[in-house]
Structures are given as structure tokens and as C-alpha cells.
Image: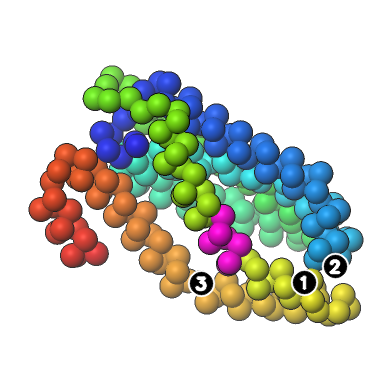
Amino acid sequence: FVSEEGCLSKREKWTMFFGMLGVGFIMFAVLFFGAPIAAGLLNDAALVPLIRIISPLVLTYAVYSFFTGYLNGLRGFKFEAALRVLYGFLKLFFIIGLAAITMSVFYAFAGFVLASIVIVAVGYIVFRKVNAETREKIRQQECSPIQFFKFALPLFVFVLITNILLSLDLWMIKALFPPSIANVQAAYYTVASTISRLSFYAVMALTAVLLPIVSHLSHYERFDKVRLYIRNA
């Protein structure tokens, strides 16, 4: 919706923002109050406080995704990339830093949450700056909340299933291995799977750039340009 005409109406922005915030809040509540159930399924009661400390991440990430998605739709790739790179460094700094200072895994998870809070604050500043530059633009046709949610629902399901598939193997190691070795094996497996996904993330960088460009050009029926971009990609 953003990339089609390079702007959103005020109502559309609020609809999308609070829609994502609402979903994030529901998932936060499910994670926080369902932590004992999740820990039980993973065969490790010690995970309850860790699951609860990271539960705000789904809330902050929903807001962060709104900011980065909006910037992506405007094809403001330098702003989007800057936020993503900064988020990576913040996670590295707070997670490793707090773990090193406290020698506690709990504070490493707390560092992850702290990094997400900082990036949301920075994202809001960037969003306000970019939003001010596009505020005068008027969309030709405003989409209704129903249109937005009908469009978003299949994408939501797709992302949910993709993330489950990317994590299911690790969950099975935690759930099915004997508790005495599950944590160590899960750690080794996480390192190996992270390295193996580097090519996946490289492709995601290409799609992140290509999608808003194709959306924008298709909206104005510039199919010659669409073909050119897809062929080059």
C-alpha cells in the first residue's frame, strides 16, 4: 500500500499501526501468560522467566516492523538499512555486554529487549522525519481497514508458517533430547543453523529492494520497467 503511490493517508497510517500493535499485544499476552505451557512443551521449566522476559519483543518488533515497512514502501532504503544495521549492533552491544558484565543468560535476554526498545525510539525519530516529507502527498484512492486486513492476513499466515518452519527443528531438539544435554545440543545446533541461513538472508535483501519497486511500477502500469528489474534481479 505504501509503495504503490509513495504515501499513505493519516487514517491508513493509524489503521496499519494499531493493527500491527494489536496483533503484537495479543502475542505478547499469549507468550507471557502461556510461558509455563511453552516451557513444559520444551521440557525445561527453567525457561519460564526467560520466555517472559523476552515476551515484550513481539510488541516492540511490531512497532519496529511498521517503521521499517513504511520506509521500505517509500523506497527509503538508506533509512531502512541504517535502522536494520543499528538494530544489529544494538543487539550485539546489549546482549554480549550485559552477559559479560553479569555472567547471566537472563540479562543477555534482557539486553535483547533493551536493544529493541532503543531501536523503536530511533525508528520513531526517523519515521517522523520521513513522514514530514511525504505528508503533503495525497493518495488517489484510500484503502479501507477491511481491504488492508484482507491483504495482510495471507502475508501474516505466510510469515508465521515460515518462522515456525525455521524454528521447529530447534524446538524439537529442546523437547526431545534428554534435559541433561538438551541445552548444549541446542546451542551447537543454533550456531550451525545460523551459519547455514546466510544465503537465505542474502536473498531476502534482494527481495526487500525489489518488492516495493515492482509494486510501485505495476501500480502505474510501467510493465516494461517491471520486466527489466525482474530480469536483472
Q: Taking 208 as reference, is 198 above or below it?
A: below
Task: Give the CA distance from mark 1 to mark 3.
Answer: 20 Å
Question: Type of residue at label 1?
Answer: Lys
First in sequence: mark 2 vs mark 1: 2
Q: Does the magenta stretch include residue 142?
A: no
> Judging from the image, what secondary structure is the residue with disc 1 in?
helix
73 to the left or right of 177: left
> Residues in magenta?
160-166
Residue drawn at x 35%, y 58% as measured from the top left:
207
The dominant secondary structure in magenta is helix
**Marks 1 and 3 close (CB-CB < 8 Å):** no
In the image, residue 138 above or below residue 186: above
In the image, residue 164 lies in the stretch drawn in magenta: yes
- Which quadrant would the C terminus be assigned to in this image? bottom left
Q: Camera-side residue: 89 or 194?
A: 194
Q: For the N terminus, which image quadrant?
A: top left
> Which one is in front, 94 or 217?
217
| Mark 1 or mark 3, earlier in chain | 1
Residue that label 1 marks: 174
| Residue 183 appears in the rendering | yes
Q: Report which residue position mark 2 lands on.
A: 43
- Inter-mark Cα distance, 2 to 1: 7 Å
- Identify which residue, 125 or 17, lies in the foreground: 17
Quadrant housing residue 164: bottom right
* Tag 2 and tag 1, C-beta contact below 8 Å: yes
Look at the numbered disc 2 and give the secondary structure of its residue: loop
The amino acid on which the numbered mark 3 sits, given as a three-letter code, is Arg
Instruction: Give the residue pinned by disc 3.
Output: 197
Q: Is mark 3 on a helix, strand or loop?
A: loop
Q: Which amino acid does label 2 sit on?
A: Asn
Counting the numbered discs, the total is 3
